[in-house]
Amino acid sequence: MTSEVAYTRTCRLALERAVRTLLAEIGDIPIGTPGQFPYGWRKAAKGRTVWRLLEEAISQNLEARAASLGIYDFVPADSEVGVYDFAFRFADTGTIYVNVKSAVAGGRTNKDDISKGDKLLNFFSTTSACTLFIVTIELQFLSSPLRIRLSNCYVVPVSWLPDIYVNPSNNGNLQSSKYKDFSSAIPRSQAEFITLLRVEWANAVAKRNRKRSS
């Protein structure tokens, strides 16, 4: 386990460095002009409003700048509903899988969806030596002109999330409130994570079945 944990740490640090470099190179992303949005962001200043554009910007720029970032074999996911958005490797690593999320700077800490529990189980069970990370991009919504600033990033291994909970009432999604907090991460092997996730998935299925039969 020690070597696996050390390897995950190495991958995480390399991924974080690459994403931070990328965010600085991308800069602010313009959205519109004052004439197009005369009243500014209003209720649109939310992460979920722009998350798909964010994901595409990160993915495309990582692919386009792969050589300068030391990235090899970049492959976007072939599905929008899978457990990762793209995969690649560094010169000294195996394949790294990345799930991009967004968070509004200064926003509340919530228990948010990570991915569907059954899909995660299948992914970790069938992908050898896989390393899956959540990369959360912090957003600032700026005005005059309207633009989004990608101000920070947080990189946490999914298998190290401290609060593993599968919500039976929300399509069986694994949820966590700590996906931006690496300081609270619990170093685990993939096998340990799969064991914990299987228990949570079984509990969620049992709760859902009891609710349907009551």
Image (tube, helix red, strand yellow):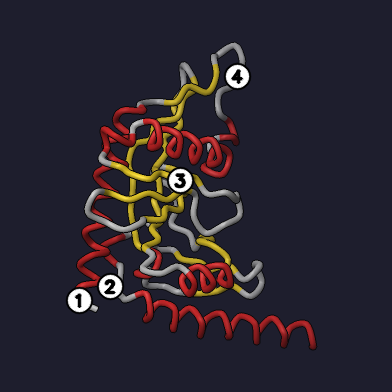
Image position, residue 68 (x, y; %): 26, 33
Q: Judging from the image, what secondary structure is the residue with disc 4 in? A: loop
- Give the residue number, with chain letter if any, for mark 2: 187
| Separation (CA) of disc 4 from disc 2 | 46 Å
Q: Is residue 30 above or below residue 110?
A: above
Q: Is residue 193 left or right of residue 54?
A: left
| Separation (CA) of disc 3 from disc 1 | 29 Å
Q: Judging from the image, what secondary structure is the residue with disc 2 in? A: loop
3 vs 1, front mark: 3
Please name the amino acid that badge 1 sits on: Thr
| Separation (CA) of disc 4 from disc 3 | 36 Å
Quadrant of the drawing holding the C terminus = bottom right
| Separation (CA) of disc 1 from disc 2 | 9 Å
State the residue at coordinates (44%, 63%): 177
Point out which mark residue 2 bears.
1
Label 1 Cα neighbours within 10 Å, binned few <14 / some 14-19 / many ≥20: few
- Give the residue number, with chain letter if any, for mark 3: 75
Image position, residue 111 (x, y; %): 49, 63
**Quick one: 44 or 95, which is closer to the camera?**
95
Please name the amino acid that badge 2 sits on: Pro
State the residue at coordinates (27%, 49%): 90
